Amino acid sequence: MPGAAAGTAASGAGSAGAAAAGMLPAQEAAKIYHTNYVRNSRAIGVLWAIFTICFAIVNVVCFIQPYWIGDGVDTPQAGYFGLFHYCIGNGFSRELTCRGSFTDFSSLPSGAFKAASFFIGLSMMLIIACIVCFILFFFCNTATVYKICAWMQLTSAACLILGCMIFPDGWDSDEVKRMCGEKTDKYTLGACSVRWAYILAIIGILDALILSFLAFVLGNRQDSLLAEELKLENKDDGNA
């Protein structure tokens, strides 16, 4: 009888050891998956940060450069217009007379240009503030910082949309008509053409929307990542 009992105990210990051995590979696989998950999230986060900086540069360039619309082959005058700075020829020489400043809104030829300058400038300030918020990754919850940046990027995109939609409303101003001809009207450019800064601003809208969507996804992944870490810690504590 003692021998049988010892055999039973030995078999029970063996089955328990086999079960424990069977559990170890599953835990190891979970840890490997978790490690890869963290590595991929960080890599995507770095790319997101790089493209956010690129978008900020695009936004600044669109705001500063005066090449939103410009003259064409059949325009009465040579010149170009930006958000708050424009240059027009006088018809007798190739020299352009430049006017307009962001610090002096009264020099802008249209209220629509003033509104567009405000919204594009606000978009630029928001994305710069988003980059400044990168410092918070060292002090605050990562998921929270991603979501803050996502809302800032989404708002920046909304401001860009408003600026790009409002800007053509000022094409009926006297200064634009002097360059583009009398057929020019609101949202009708006449003999002039759209220049690269306006196109770049429209591309920037798509960029900002994609970046904000990616930031929301990264924020949600960080939440699930924290939950996975807690599960692994609980399993390790239970095995201990």
Image (cartoon, rainbow, N blue to C red):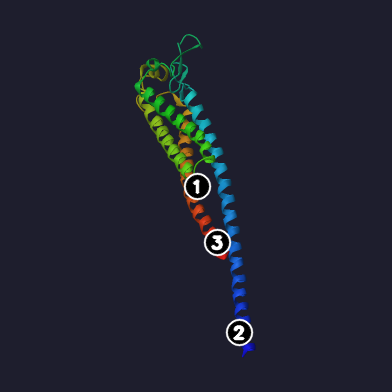
- Residue 130 horizontal/vertical position (percent): 48, 35
- Which residue is at 56% across, 38% downward? 50
Quadrant in which the C terminus appears: bottom right
Q: In this view, does 234 lie to the left or right of 164?
A: right
State the CA–CA distance, disc 3 to disc 2: 29 Å
Residue 155, quarter of picture? top left
- Which residue is at 49% across, 38% downward? 207
- Residue 37 horizontal/vertical position (percent): 56, 53
Q: Is mark 1 on a helix, strand or loop?
A: helix
State the CA–CA distance, disc 1 to disc 3: 28 Å
User: Badge 1 is on which residue?
Assistant: 218
Mark toward the start of the polypeptide (1 vs 2): 2
Mark toward the start of the polypeptide (1 vs 3): 1
Q: Residue furthest top?
A: 92
Residue 84 position (above or below residue 128): above
Q: Can residue 152 be seen in this view?
A: yes
- Which residue is at 38% across, 32% downward? 162
Residue 225 position (above or below residue 237): above
User: Badge 2 is on which residue?
Assistant: 8
Disc number lying in front (1 or 3): 3
Indicate the amino acid at tag 2: Thr
Task: Tell me whether circle 3 and circle 2 mark residues in contact (CB < 8 Å).
Answer: no
Residue 34 position (above or below residue 6): above
Q: Can residue 196 be seen in this view?
A: no
User: Badge 3 is on which residue?
Assistant: 237
Mark toward the start of the polypeptide (3 vs 2): 2
